[in-house]
Protein backbone atom coordinates (compact mmCIF):
# COMPACT_ATOMS: atom_id res chain seq x y z
CA UNK A 1 0.00 0.00 0.00
CA UNK A 2 1.05 3.59 -0.59
CA UNK A 3 0.74 5.54 2.71
CA UNK A 4 0.29 9.25 3.31
CA UNK A 5 0.02 11.34 6.47
CA UNK A 6 -2.06 14.52 6.56
CA UNK A 7 -1.62 17.14 9.27
CA UNK A 8 -4.53 19.54 9.72
CA UNK A 9 -3.36 23.03 10.71
CA UNK A 10 -4.45 26.63 10.98
CA UNK A 11 -2.54 29.88 10.73
CA UNK A 12 -1.59 30.73 14.35
CA UNK A 13 -3.42 34.05 14.52
CA UNK A 14 -4.29 35.61 17.87
CA UNK A 15 -7.97 35.22 18.68
CA UNK A 16 -8.41 32.54 15.98
CA UNK A 17 -6.74 29.46 17.53
CA UNK A 18 -6.86 27.84 20.98
CA UNK A 19 -9.47 30.33 22.16
CA UNK A 20 -10.51 28.01 25.00
CA UNK A 21 -7.11 28.67 26.57
CA UNK A 22 -7.97 32.38 26.91
CA UNK A 23 -7.91 32.97 29.82
CA UNK A 24 -5.56 32.10 31.50
CA UNK A 25 -3.44 32.76 28.40
CA UNK A 26 -3.71 35.90 26.35
CA UNK A 27 -4.82 35.53 22.70
CA UNK A 28 -1.23 36.16 21.64
CA UNK A 29 0.12 33.51 24.01
CA UNK A 30 -2.47 31.00 22.82
CA UNK A 31 -1.47 31.66 19.21
CA UNK A 32 2.23 31.24 19.99
CA UNK A 33 1.56 28.02 21.87
CA UNK A 34 -0.35 26.72 18.86
CA UNK A 35 2.54 27.67 16.57
CA UNK A 36 4.92 25.72 18.81
CA UNK A 37 2.63 22.69 18.87
CA UNK A 38 2.26 22.74 15.09
CA UNK A 39 6.00 22.93 14.45
CA UNK A 40 6.67 20.21 17.04
CA UNK A 41 4.04 17.98 15.41
CA UNK A 42 5.59 18.39 11.96
CA UNK A 43 9.11 17.74 13.26
CA UNK A 44 8.11 14.70 15.28
CA UNK A 45 6.38 13.01 12.34
CA UNK A 46 9.52 13.20 10.15
CA UNK A 47 11.08 9.95 11.49
CA UNK A 48 8.09 8.02 10.13
CA UNK A 49 9.51 8.56 6.61
CA UNK A 50 5.98 8.68 5.20
CA UNK A 51 4.81 11.17 2.59
CA UNK A 52 3.38 14.02 4.64
CA UNK A 53 1.00 16.78 3.59
CA UNK A 54 -0.22 19.81 5.52
CA UNK A 55 -3.86 20.67 4.94
CA UNK A 56 -3.96 24.28 6.02
CA UNK A 57 -6.62 26.84 6.87
CA UNK A 58 -5.68 30.50 6.74
CA UNK A 59 -2.75 32.33 5.19
CA UNK A 60 -0.50 30.13 3.07
CA UNK A 61 2.43 32.53 3.50
CA UNK A 62 2.91 31.44 7.11
CA UNK A 63 3.20 27.78 6.16
CA UNK A 64 5.54 28.49 3.23
CA UNK A 65 7.91 30.20 5.65
CA UNK A 66 7.48 27.98 8.72
CA UNK A 67 7.56 24.52 7.14
CA UNK A 68 9.29 24.83 3.77
CA UNK A 69 9.48 21.66 1.76
CA UNK A 70 6.23 20.06 2.89
CA UNK A 71 3.43 19.99 0.31
CA UNK A 72 0.55 22.26 1.24
CA UNK A 73 -3.10 21.72 0.34
CA UNK A 74 -5.81 24.18 1.43
CA UNK A 75 -8.64 22.75 3.48
CA UNK A 76 -12.03 22.79 1.78
CA UNK A 77 -15.50 22.67 3.32
CA UNK A 78 -17.59 24.55 5.86
CA UNK A 79 -17.35 21.93 8.60
CA UNK A 80 -14.81 19.44 9.86
CA UNK A 81 -16.58 16.52 8.22
CA UNK A 82 -16.39 18.08 4.77
CA UNK A 83 -12.76 19.08 5.32
CA UNK A 84 -11.84 15.53 6.31
CA UNK A 85 -13.71 14.07 3.36
CA UNK A 86 -11.91 16.49 1.04
CA UNK A 87 -8.51 15.54 2.48
CA UNK A 88 -9.05 11.81 2.07
CA UNK A 89 -10.39 12.32 -1.45
CA UNK A 90 -7.46 14.54 -2.43
CA UNK A 91 -4.88 12.05 -1.17
CA UNK A 92 -6.65 9.16 -2.88
CA UNK A 93 -6.55 11.11 -6.14
CA UNK A 94 -2.79 11.43 -5.68
CA UNK A 95 -2.46 7.65 -5.51
CA UNK A 96 -2.46 7.07 -1.75
CA UNK A 97 -4.68 4.35 -0.33
CA UNK A 98 -3.54 4.10 3.32
CA UNK A 99 -4.23 7.62 4.62
CA UNK A 100 -3.97 8.93 8.17
CA UNK A 101 -5.06 12.37 9.37
CA UNK A 102 -3.93 13.98 12.61
CA UNK A 103 -4.31 17.46 14.02
CA UNK A 104 -1.73 19.84 15.42
CA UNK A 105 -3.17 19.89 18.94
CA UNK A 106 -1.24 16.92 20.36
CA UNK A 107 2.47 17.74 20.08
CA UNK A 108 3.42 14.85 22.37
CA UNK A 109 1.34 12.22 20.55
CA UNK A 110 3.40 9.00 20.78
CA UNK A 111 4.85 8.06 17.40
CA UNK A 112 4.12 4.34 17.97
CA UNK A 113 0.41 5.18 17.83
CA UNK A 114 0.79 6.68 14.35
CA UNK A 115 2.99 3.82 13.17
CA UNK A 116 0.43 1.34 14.42
CA UNK A 117 -2.31 3.08 12.46
CA UNK A 118 -0.39 2.60 9.21
CA UNK A 119 0.47 -0.98 10.11
CA UNK A 120 -3.18 -1.79 10.73
CA UNK A 121 -4.25 -0.28 7.42
CA UNK A 122 -1.56 -2.23 5.58
CA UNK A 123 -2.83 -5.40 7.27
CA UNK A 124 -6.31 -4.84 5.87
CA UNK A 125 -8.22 -2.78 8.43
CA UNK A 126 -10.66 -0.39 6.79
CA UNK A 127 -10.59 2.32 9.46
CA UNK A 128 -8.46 3.22 12.46
CA UNK A 129 -9.44 5.74 15.14
CA UNK A 130 -7.38 7.29 17.89
CA UNK A 131 -9.86 8.02 20.71
CA UNK A 132 -9.51 11.40 22.41
CA UNK A 133 -10.57 11.93 25.99
CA UNK A 134 -13.25 14.44 24.99
CA UNK A 135 -15.21 11.90 22.96
CA UNK A 136 -13.67 12.76 19.61
CA UNK A 137 -10.56 11.38 18.00
CA UNK A 138 -6.99 12.62 17.61
CA UNK A 139 -6.33 10.43 14.57
CA UNK A 140 -8.36 8.80 11.84
CA UNK A 141 -6.98 6.48 9.21
CA UNK A 142 -8.74 4.93 6.25
CA UNK A 143 -8.11 2.42 3.51
CA UNK A 144 -10.10 2.99 0.33
CA UNK A 145 -13.67 4.12 1.22
CA UNK A 146 -14.19 7.18 3.35
CA UNK A 147 -16.98 9.71 2.73
CA UNK A 148 -19.78 8.19 4.76
CA UNK A 149 -17.71 8.22 7.96
CA UNK A 150 -17.72 12.02 8.06
CA UNK A 151 -21.38 12.72 7.35
CA UNK A 152 -24.01 13.22 10.02
CA UNK A 153 -21.46 13.55 12.84
CA UNK A 154 -22.24 15.88 15.79
CA UNK A 155 -18.89 17.65 15.58
CA UNK A 156 -17.44 19.43 18.63
CA UNK A 157 -19.44 17.23 20.97
CA UNK A 158 -18.82 14.16 23.13
CA UNK A 159 -20.42 11.73 20.63
CA UNK A 160 -18.07 12.17 17.67
CA UNK A 161 -16.24 8.87 18.06
CA UNK A 162 -19.31 6.93 19.16
CA UNK A 163 -21.27 8.10 16.12
CA UNK A 164 -18.34 7.44 13.78
CA UNK A 165 -17.98 3.88 15.05
CA UNK A 166 -21.71 3.28 14.61
CA UNK A 167 -21.49 4.43 11.00
CA UNK A 168 -18.43 2.24 10.43
CA UNK A 169 -20.33 -0.78 11.77
CA UNK A 170 -23.34 0.03 9.61
CA UNK A 171 -21.14 0.20 6.52
CA UNK A 172 -19.37 -3.06 7.38
CA UNK A 173 -15.98 -1.45 7.96
CA UNK A 174 -13.36 -3.40 9.89
CA UNK A 175 -12.35 -0.75 12.44
CA UNK A 176 -9.71 -0.61 15.17
CA UNK A 177 -9.22 1.68 18.18
CA UNK A 178 -5.74 2.90 19.13
CA UNK A 179 -4.85 3.81 22.73
CA UNK A 180 -6.49 6.90 24.20
CA UNK A 181 -4.72 10.25 24.05
CA UNK A 182 -5.73 13.90 24.31
CA UNK A 183 -5.66 17.23 22.50
CA UNK A 184 -4.45 20.37 24.21
CA UNK A 185 -7.77 22.22 24.35
CA UNK A 186 -8.41 23.39 27.91
CA UNK A 187 -6.35 25.17 30.60
CA UNK A 188 -6.16 21.90 32.54
CA UNK A 189 -4.43 20.26 29.57
CA UNK A 190 -1.52 22.68 29.94
CA UNK A 191 -0.61 20.92 33.19
CA UNK A 192 -0.42 17.39 31.84
CA UNK A 193 2.86 15.78 32.83
CA UNK A 194 3.52 14.40 29.36
CA UNK A 195 3.74 17.93 27.94
CA UNK A 196 6.71 18.69 30.20
CA UNK A 197 8.43 15.33 29.71
CA UNK A 198 11.88 15.94 28.15
CA UNK A 199 11.50 12.66 26.26
CA UNK A 200 8.33 13.69 24.44
CA UNK A 201 10.14 15.39 21.55
CA UNK A 202 7.94 18.50 21.73
CA UNK A 203 10.79 20.87 22.52
CA UNK A 204 9.22 24.15 21.37
CA UNK A 205 6.02 23.44 23.30
CA UNK A 206 7.93 22.56 26.47
CA UNK A 207 10.09 25.66 26.26
CA UNK A 208 7.14 27.95 25.72
CA UNK A 209 5.21 26.44 28.62
CA UNK A 210 8.24 26.98 30.85
CA UNK A 211 8.40 30.58 29.64
CA UNK A 212 4.80 30.94 30.76
CA UNK A 213 5.70 29.47 34.14
CA UNK A 214 3.87 26.21 33.49
CA UNK A 215 5.79 23.06 34.37
CA UNK A 216 3.47 20.09 34.69
CA UNK A 217 6.18 17.77 35.98
CA UNK A 218 7.04 20.22 38.77
CA UNK A 219 3.36 20.68 39.58
CA UNK A 220 2.94 16.91 39.90
CA UNK A 221 6.00 16.65 42.13
CA UNK A 222 4.70 19.36 44.43
CA UNK A 223 1.30 17.69 44.55
CA UNK A 224 2.89 14.36 45.46
CA UNK A 225 5.08 15.88 48.19
CA UNK A 226 2.10 17.67 49.75
CA UNK A 227 0.24 14.36 49.97
CA UNK A 228 3.14 12.40 51.47
Image (cartoon, rainbow, N blue to C red):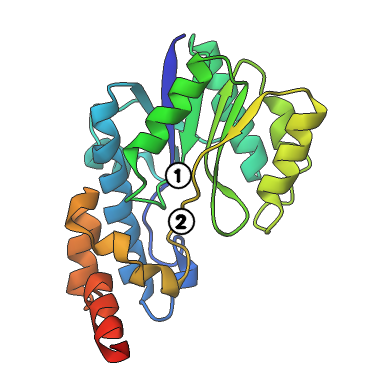
Give the secondary structure at mark 1. Answer: loop
Location of residue 150 by image quarter:
top right
At which x and y percent is residue 79? 65, 45
Q: Is residue 225 left or right of residue 79?
A: left
Q: Residue furthest right?
A: 170
Q: Is residue 201 left or right of residue 92?
A: left
Where 43 sits versus 144, above or below? below
- How packed mark 1 is, by other alpha carbons closer than 10 Å (few <14, some 14-19, many 20 or more), is many
Please state which of residues 62 and 190 is positioned toward the viewer in this rendering: 190
Please state which of residues 211 and 48 is positioned toward the viewer in this rendering: 48
At 57% from the left and 14% from the top, the residue drawn is 124
Q: Which mark is residue 103?
A: 1
Q: Which mark is residue 217?
A: none
Location of residue 190 by image quarter:
bottom left
Residue 35 showing in the rendered view: yes
Q: Is residue 84 left or right of residue 110?
A: right
What residue is shown with label 2?
Answer: 183
At 27% from the left and 46% from the top, the residue drawn is 39
At 27% from the left and 22% from the top, the residue drawn is 49
Q: Are marks 1 and 2 in contact (CB under 8 Å)?
A: yes
At 60% from the left and 37% from the top, the residue drawn is 83
At which x and y percent is residue 184? 42, 60
Give the secondary structure at mark 2. Answer: loop
Q: How many marks?
A: 2
Amino acid sequence: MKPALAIFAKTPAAGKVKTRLTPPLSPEESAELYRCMLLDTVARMAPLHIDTFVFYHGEREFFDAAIPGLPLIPQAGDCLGKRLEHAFTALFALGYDARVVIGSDAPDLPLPFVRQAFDLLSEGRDAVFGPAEDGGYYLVGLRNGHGCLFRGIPWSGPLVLETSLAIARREGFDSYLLPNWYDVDSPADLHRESLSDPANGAQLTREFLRKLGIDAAQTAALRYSSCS
